[in-house]
Amino acid sequence: MSATLFTQNIIACIWDFDKTLIPGYMQAPLFRRFGIDEGNFWAETNALLENYRRRGYHLSGEISYLNHILTYVLAGKFGRLNNRILRDCGRDIAFYPGLPDFFGTMRTYVREKPEYEKHEIQLEHYIVSTGLAEMIRGSAIAGQVEGIWGCEFIENPLQPGFLAQGEMELSADAVIAQIGMVIDNTTKTRALFEINKGTNKNAAIDVNANVPPEDRRIPFQNMIYIADGPSDIPSFSVVKGRGGRTYGVYNPDHGGEFEQNDRLLQSGRIHGYGPADYTPAGSTARWLRLHIHAMCDRIVSDREQAVARKTSKPPRHLNATPEELAAERAAKTPRQSSFLE
C-alpha cells in the first residue's frame, strides 16, 4: 500500500525582505558602519552594467552588487569584512511597524478554531531575498522563520591542491572573497519549488525530481507570497498560477508604491495589496488572517472528504432490526404542513 510523503496540513507565508519587511535596503547598517555613502554605492552599482557592456562584458544584475561589495573589500573600504560582521550588522536592521512580533501572531491564526487544531494545521514563515542571507540571520526576525534564502559570500576560498592537503585550518581573521550563492528575482522561484516539494526539509528530495502533487510537502495552494513590487512578478506568477495567494505591500509614505501595487492588482499579478504596517488591527494583518483562515477551512474540508472516501461503512444486518424499521416508517410518514409553508 502506497503512503504519501507529507500530510499537507502546513501553510507557508513566503516573504520578500527589502521594502517588504523593512522600508529600505538591508545593507544600510553595513554602509553606516564603514562610513560608505549608500546613495553613491547604489549609483555605482547601477552604472556597472552599462560600463562593463562597453568593455564587452555581460553581467547579471544581482551579481553586480555582490561583486561591487567584493571590490570595496579589495580596496579596503570595508576593512576585513566577513560573515560575522555581516551578521552583526543585521542586528541594526529596523523593521516596519508590528514586526517581528506579527510573525508569531500569525501562527495563532491556525489555532483559532477547534477543527484547525484537530487537523494539526501549522503555519511556517520563509524569507526569500536578493539581499544578504547573513544579515537576515543576524536580524531580529531570524528566530521567527523556518528558512532563509539569500545571497552569500565565501571566506577563505579553498586553494589549488587543497584535496592533497587534508584538513585545512580556518583563519579566525577571515575575509569574504568569493560569491557563494546568488538569489535573483528569477531564481527566487527555485526556492518556491524547494519549499513546495520539501527539499529544504529532506535533502533526499531533489528540487528537479518529478514529485506527484499529493506527495509535495506544501502545495502551492497553501502558500501566500508577500512582496513589494514588479521585481517579484516571477514569484507572484508561480504562486498565483498554481492556486496560492499573492499580496503586495507599499510604504504609506511613498505614493508611487501605492500606484505600483494597484497596477499589479489590475494586471492580475496579485490578489490584494495594503500598507506595510503589520500591526494586528491594520488592513494587511486582516487580509492575511482572512486568507489564512480560508486555507485552513479548505485543508479541513479536503482532509475530512479524504477520510470519508477512504473508509468504508461498518457492516449491517441483512434483516433490519425493529428499531431500523420504525425509523424507516417514520421517515416515510407524510409531515403536516406548517402554516408558514
Image: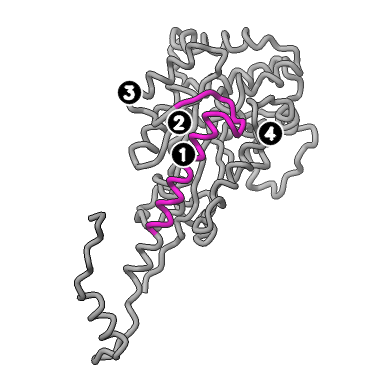
Task: Give the image location of residue 130, x and y in percent.
Answer: 54, 28
Q: Earlier in the sequence, mark 3 or mark 1?
A: 1
Q: Which quarter of the figure has residue 304?
A: bottom left
- The numbered dot on residue 155 is 4
CA gap between label 2 and label 3 equals: 13 Å
Residue position for label 3: 267
Residue position for label 1: 224
Specify whether residue 275 is painted magenta.
Answer: yes
User: Which quarter of the rendering shows the C terminus?
Assistant: bottom left
Q: Nearer the viewer, residue 293 or 75?
A: 293
Residue at image position (24%, 80%) is 328
Specify whether residue 213 is painted magenta.
Answer: no
Q: Relative to 312, is 219 on the left or the right?
A: right
Q: Earlier in the sequence, mark 1 or mark 4?
A: 4
Image marks 2 and 1: residues in contact by CB distance under 8 Å = yes
Colouring: one colour
User: Callout 2, which amino acid?
Assistant: Tyr
Residue position for label 2: 247
Q: Is residue 78 visible?
A: yes
- Tell me if residue 51 comes above or below residue 296 in the rendering: above
